[in-house]
Amino acid sequence: MKKPGGAEKKKVRRSPGVASNTTPPRKQGANKDVFQLFAEKVRDHKGLVSRWAVLQETRVEYFRGKDFVAFVRNHSELKDILEPDKGLEPEDIANTLLNKNLLVRCDRVVKTVRPGKKKLSSWPAHLEINHDQVFSENGTFFAWAFVKRRPLWQTLLSFCWPVLTLAICLFPVYPHWAKLLILYICAGLLLLILCVLFIRALIFGTIWVIFGKRVWFFPNILAEEATLQDLFQFWPQKDEGERPKWTARLFYAIVAVVVILVLRHHAPDEAARARYQKRVSNIIDDVLEWSPRQALSGMMETVVNVTDSNDNATDDSKSGSEKVASPDDLGEETIPKEEIEDVTGNVEDSDHQQRDL
């Protein structure tokens, strides 16, 4: 009788071990999030070269297949995130990401070489979805299909935009020194941007006319899809186009010289420049020197002027009514003095004639 009880006790003791055998399905469920975590780490890593493009009216971040393979092989420590699947090859990892809809295979929209170029662009600006969603290393592009997590500093920065907007609207009530500081900073930044654009255009035109090469310093400064790191890239990219003909270079050189001469001939003289500068300075001074006190004082002056004008109008109306009411004034105003003297003189003459008779 004890043996069955003991057997039952042993079964009860082994029951936790049986329950432990049910844990592997949880690990399998965790593996689904492991690949997403790996994709987020790869996307945030600076070692993988990526660009921005338009995919069906949506801006996406994409990379090339060969760059992904080289990145995974050079940064094998990131594969430790995959835990049991860290031994997979880069191609297998990419196919898993495609199956989990974390990646989308894309293709370039423009597939023909444009006139004047030898080959297609390495990073196209417009993409379309490829029907074959299988990883390939050569000549393929892959876009991230998940929303990138927003860092904490971006979340905090989003709350600062309303404050910044309110501060811009309250610029007229700033003290004078704050207005001058903001004016000089904005003018300096604008002058810096215009000088950089002018200098890079001048260098490009000079090198293009003389040597026939396209050299753009700060090549991504006007690119909308460029990141902050690519925006301040100083060194120019390699020229992929054909060398222009000498006739085209000579023609544009002549056009540039003619435009410079015309602008110099029609440039404003010193007097006109002084007038323009005075107008601009007056406008700026009106904005900088304005204050709520001046606005209130101006309103008070207008109110005082209006009340004085109303009082004068009422006094004039009263005096006018008095003049109209008095009949003597009417008689004096209607009959001139000369006519009165003539009438009195005629009356006196008639009296003398009657006396003589």
Image (cartoon, helix red, strand yellow):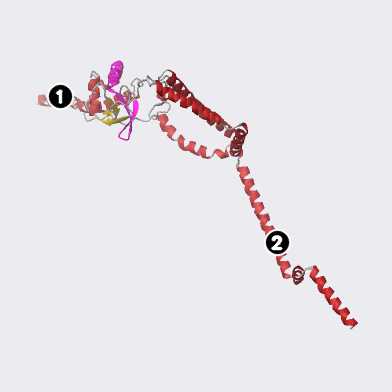
The residue at the point 66 percent across, 55 percent down is 307
* Residue 314 in the image: above or below residue 177: below
Q: Secondary structure at mark 2?
A: helix
Residue that lies at the very extreme toward the left in this rendered image: 1
- Check disc 2 and give the amino acid type: Asp
Query: In front: 304, or 116?
Result: 116
Question: In x, y percent, where is residue 327?
Answer: 75, 72
- Judged left or right of residue 328, residue 352 is right
Span of residues in magenta: 51-76
Does residue 104 show up? no
The residue at the point 60 percent across, 41 percent down is 291
**The stretch drawn in magenta includes residue 68:** yes
- Judged left or right of residue 225, residue 295 is right
- Position of the N terminus by quadrant: top left
Residue 316's tag is 2
- Check disc 1 and give the amino acid type: Lys
**The stretch drawn in magenta includes residue 279:** no
Question: In x, y percent, where is residue 114?
Answer: 32, 26
Does residue 309 show up? yes
Mark 2 burial class by Cα count in 10 Å: few <14, some 14-19, many 20+: few
Which residue, given by chain and number where applicable, does mark 1 sit on? 10
Location of residue 134 by image quarter: top left
